[in-house]
Image: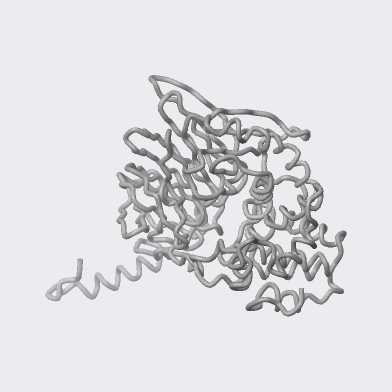
Amino acid sequence: MGVPRSSAVAPFALALAVVLTACGGGGVHGKPGASGVRDPYFPKMGNGGYDVSHYGLTLSYDPRRKHLDGTAEITARATQNLSAFHLDLKGLDVEGVTVEGKDARWNRAGQELTVRPHDDLDKGETFRATVRYSGTPETITDPDTSEEGWLRTADGAVALGEPTGSMAWFPGNHHPSDKASYDIRITVPEGLKAVSNGELTGETTAKGRTTFDWHTAEPMASYVATLAIGEYKISRSTTENGLPVYVAVDPTQVKASKKVLAQIPEIMDWEEYNFGPYPFSSTGAIVDRGDDAGYALESQTRPFFPGAPDTKTLVHELAHQWYGDSVTPESWKDMWLNEGFATYAEWLWQEDHDGDTADEIFNSLYKGDYYDDPADNEAVWAFPPAKPTSAAHISDSPVYERGAMVLHKIRQAVGDDTFYDIIQGWAAAHRHGNADTDDFTAYVEKMAPDQDFSEIWKDWLYGEGKPDHP
């Protein structure tokens, strides 16, 4: 409300208000956090002004009605003085928001849920925001036309998040640069299973409904958070090192996937030998029907597969637990640090298991006879792995195959002993953190200070087109 022009005391009142504010006696001292982190490919994703440490999600899903009820308790620390902050949430109906137990004002604009706390938040202050919401979760179509978010299946649903899908089923700071721990409690009709990341800490049934409690202690980017609901067959085992293995398989895929999933302990032992200590407290897989999704995804501790995977794909997604899930890209520009590493893991597996050597695969790609289709061979050189041309291309061949070729060039330059020191050390140095391409090139140069990598970076990592020499 403005000051009336006719009020004789207005100047004095205004001056007094200024003095009180300066002395801490009231007034707004914060400003709204940014509505995005300006990711080069998804600028609206993520939010500024706070850092999330934990998500507590209490969910209930009715597959028949396609209806989700949710409460999200978000624990975060303000990184600036905040008068308002944003959460990413696409679709769903918000029923109420509180901050530190007090009702907060809020409004919606596209995928942005803007929250205005009753009291401003001080920089460094830890706070809890609670959002109650419900509705029919959306399936999101990516710029590359793939589908993510909440995908309905024949007997339930699966939530897949890369790169923007997690905002379809819970509000949050949905950018890979803000990782957090999770507790996910999900209630579904009795007879269905609900599978998520981390460890199952509780399972109870009452009044025709079953509740599953999942806990993820290690930091997790929201895009690798998952939730799968269906009539899964569950198997539990351990690796030789005692690591729990939790596998959920759609009944139609049990026979086809039995042999390959039995390799998980062997693959995990091989990957630990090559990549260093496993960064999480459990592993496993989720296998759904082949038409439930168009791709596999490295969901943290529990990769998702549409249909029975082959060994190569299983190796790839489990390698992501080190490269992508534990060491997470700082932005979507750095996807090759995920996919190049996981693709190179496939090459190393083949090399160690009587298949083509990594050198043979590299040369086949360079010569253009790796794929049967000439267009697929040409696509490898469409753009540099560290510079995808747009959001629609962050999962294209150069990010995978040419990214792996960058690693092979490093291996050729430094030899096997130093190369394995580099890839193991990289996973250890950024364990549970974020890193970008500049961090990686600096790390490689530090680990091999006598080697000149400038040509590799120029020609293979950032260079346009096919390098002149393999």
Residue 430 locus on image (x, y percent): 69, 57
Examine the rendered structure and indicate whether residue 13 appears above or below residue 269: below
Q: Residue at x 61, y 60 (%)?
A: 329
Q: Quadrant of residue 24?
A: bottom left
Furthest-left residue in this view: 6
Position of residue 415 relative to residue 196, above or below, is: below
Q: Position of residue 105 (x, y in %)?
A: 30, 53
Count up the numbered dots: 0
Q: Pinpoint residue 60: horizontal percent, then vertical percent.
A: 40, 34
Q: Is residue 117 left or right of residue 418?
A: left
Image quarter of the N terminus: bottom left
Image x and y of residue 147, in percent: 44, 52
Image quarter hosting the C terminus: bottom right
From the viewer's perspective, is residue 250 above or below residue 116?
Answer: above
Residue furthest to the top: 207
**Residue 395 location, quadrant:** bottom right
